[in-house]
Image: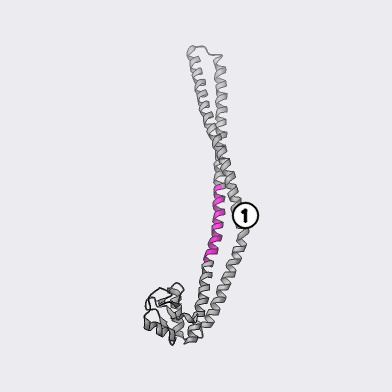
């Protein structure tokens, strides 16, 4: 039985390493995905600002054309003023010229706001482009490396499982099934040592008689609380 317990201890050591590497297989892809997402977000922000800038410039152009059209219309009205016959006509044309001047004044104010916004957008664009370049650089420098690490860790897990399974074949089927169930359901901890007078898995206090039997190592003893396989700590 001592030999079987020693095999179980070695299997648990391997499963501890497998657990660490499984965590890596989750952490490494997440790290890579976070970098890819960082690039996507940066690209989207740069694109969005570029679209805002383009729309801003189009609006400015339309406003400038509107001002130009109004100036041309005012010129026509002013020419007509030279040929008016009545005071009523004169006042009407003057009113139209005054109205267009007021309209152009308002458009000028709008243009100033648009130009201020354009300046801000250009500053934002430069800042976002720097973030974009940094994100792209980080991804480029790390993508191949992370993919390689993922492949290596995956291969190591396969190798460790093969080694553990080879050891498991030397044990009775009922013990293997019990071990596998505990690995699955007890946070990958099937075999634990006693810590003082308690279970090293859950901290449950062990009865004196159980400790005596544990030290004898004549059979596999399970924790009365968590069910994990207990091994006397001297077998470490």
Helix, strand or loop at disc 1?
helix
Say which quarter of the image contains residue 226. Answer: bottom left
Q: Percent x, y for residue 207?
A: 36, 80
- Indicate yes or no whether the magenta region holds residue 231: no
Eyeballing the image, is 63 above or below 226? above
Image point 40% across, 85% down: which residue? 213
Dominant secondary structure (helix, strand or loop) of the stretch shown in magenta: helix
Image point 55% across, 23% down: which residue? 73
Q: Percent x, y for residue 102?
A: 50, 24
Eyeballing the image, is 115 above or below 9? above
* Magenta span of residues: 25-45
**Image check: 143 left or right of 177?**
right
Say which quarter of the image contains residue 208. Answer: bottom left
- Indicate yes or no whether the magenta region holds residue 31: yes
Image point 49% across, 82% down: which residue? 235
Image point 52% across, 70% down: which residue? 20
Q: Percent x, y for residue 43?
A: 57, 50
Eyeballing the image, is 192 above or below 113? below
Q: Which residue is mark 1?
A: 137
Q: Nearer the viewer, residue 113 or 70?
A: 113
Within 10 Å of the Cα at label 1, are there few (<14), some (14-19), or many (20+) other Cα atoms?
some
- Rendered image coloring scheme: one colour
Q: Percent x, y for residue 39?
A: 57, 54
Eyeballing the image, is 20 above or below 230? above
- Badge count: 1
């Amino acid at each position: 039985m001592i030999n079987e317990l020693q095999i179980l201890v070695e299997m648990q050591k391997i499963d501890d390493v497998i657990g660490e590497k499984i965590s890596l297989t989750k952490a490494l892809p997440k790290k890579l995905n976070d970098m890819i997402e960082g690039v996507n977000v940066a690209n989207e922000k740069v694109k969005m600002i570029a679209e805002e800038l383009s729309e801003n410039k189009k609006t400015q152009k339309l406003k400038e054309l509107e001002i130009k059209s109004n100036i041309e219309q005012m010129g026509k009205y002013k020419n007509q003023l030279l040929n008016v016959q009545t005071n009523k006509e004169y006042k009407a044309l003057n009113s139209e010229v005054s109205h267009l001047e007021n309209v152009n004044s308002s458009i000028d104010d709008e243009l100033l706001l648009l130009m201020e916004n354009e300046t801000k957008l250009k500053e934002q664009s430069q800042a976002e482009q720097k973030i974009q370049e940094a994100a792209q650089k980080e991804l480029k420098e790390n993508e191949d490396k992370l993919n390689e690490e993922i492949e290596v860790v995956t291969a190591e897990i396969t190798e460790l499982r093969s080694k553990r399974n080879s050891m498991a074949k030397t044990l009775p089927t009922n013990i293997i099934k019990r071990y596998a169930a505990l690995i699955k359901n007890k946070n990958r901890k099937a075999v634990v040592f006693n810590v003082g007078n308690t279970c090293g898995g859950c901290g449950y206090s062990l009865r004196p008689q159980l400790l005596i039997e544990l030290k004898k190592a004549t059979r596999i003893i399970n924790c009365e609380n968590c069910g994990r396989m207990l091994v006397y700590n001297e077998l470490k």
